[in-house]
Image: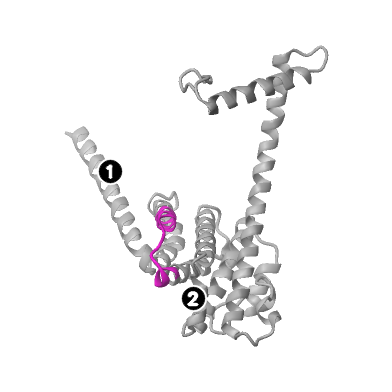
Amino acid sequence: MDSEQGTFTASGPVQRFFLKVRVAVALAIIRSRPRGVSGRAHAEALAAELSGREGGWRTEVQLLRQEVLRLRQEVLIARLSRSEAGADDTPEAGSQDLFGPEGLVHADSDTPDLSLQDLVSAVTSPQPPVCAAMHPHVHFLQRLCSLQRVGGRNQGLEALWFSPDGEAGSVLVDSLCRLLDSVVRTCGGPPLGFHDPVPQACRVAAQAMDLFCSQRLPSVELKKHVEESLRELTVMLLHSNQPSRAAEELTPCLMTLGSSSLSKSFLIGHLLSQLSALAHGLWQAFQIRRKSTL
């Protein structure tokens, strides 16, 4: 395609193929044109209809991706549970619903501040959309970390954890990235009060990052996503219109996320960069004010 004129040239098989497709689409539009409507008006009407459907298609694709990830999470937990329990265990023990009451928290969990009843209530009670999107990933990563601590001595479990197909690592990274996105969106929205899920989400995210890094080097995708999430949270903290609220809500969140070996250097770097920019801006403002008073 000619990038300047937006037209296809006929040089090469790929260009000729796209030229044929464009001609075929144009002919189909012309032949389907209702009487009394010009070809241009008919084409514009079709384009407007397709544009209106695009939002619905994107929403449907997003929902399907979430469902696929949920199923991958359940399959991975089931495999790890069976590996931990041993080959003689019953299949039902390892295939329980990850998001049912028995699959939410492990007895060896590092999060004693949330009881089983609290977790079940968090899932079943009405929640803001961003919280509803956050909870499944929190529970999955919490269960994953718990299984790793219990079965960490099992070499078979270790082999399954990060097998050559890379499924476990892929599900962990995908879930962790989605959880960090939800944390950023929640911190940028209105306060949620007593049932704020962000502190719990940050603790689980930090544990999951350490778990991943204990098994393999973090991928470029994961490092980039963690760094970008920390950058957005740091900007919120230092440039908020409500500094006291931002300090109260975001400081613990950043400290928790920064406790992970993966995110610590990113957090320190972003804080230093933002503080340097603020100091420079204050110095410039002071110089301008000083000159105006002379």
Taking the image as shown, residue 257 lies to the left or right of residue 68, namely left
CB under 8 Å between discs 1 and 2: no
Taking the image as shown, residue 203 lies to the left or right of residue 118, namely left
Q: Residue at x 23, y 37 (%)?
A: 289
Q: Residue 273: x and y, percent?
A: 29, 51
Q: Residue under circle 2?
A: 159
Q: Which residue type carries mark 1?
A: Gly
Q: Residue under circle 1?
A: 281
Q: Which residues are magenta?
A: 212-230
Front residue of 29 and 173? 29
Residue density around tag 1, few if under 14, some if 14–19, many if 20 or more, within 10 Å: few
The image quadrant of residue 19 is top right
Taking the image as shown, residue 237 lies to the left or right of residue 291, namely right
Q: Residue at x 72, y 14 (%)?
A: 39
**Disc 1 versus disc 2: nearer the observer:** 2
Secondary element under disc 1, as helix, strand or loop, is helix
Secondary element under disc 2, as helix, strand or loop, is helix
Q: Residue 177: x and y, percent?
A: 50, 58
Q: Residue 186: x and y, percent?
A: 54, 56
Q: Is residue 102 among the parts visible in the rendering?
A: yes
Q: Which residue type carries mark 2?
A: Ala
Q: Residue at x 66, y 61 (%)?
A: 127
The stretch drawn in magenta includes residue 229 = yes
Q: Residue at x 60, y 85 (%)?
A: 85
Front residue of 139 and 273? 139
Mark 1 and mark 2: Cα distance apart in space = 52 Å
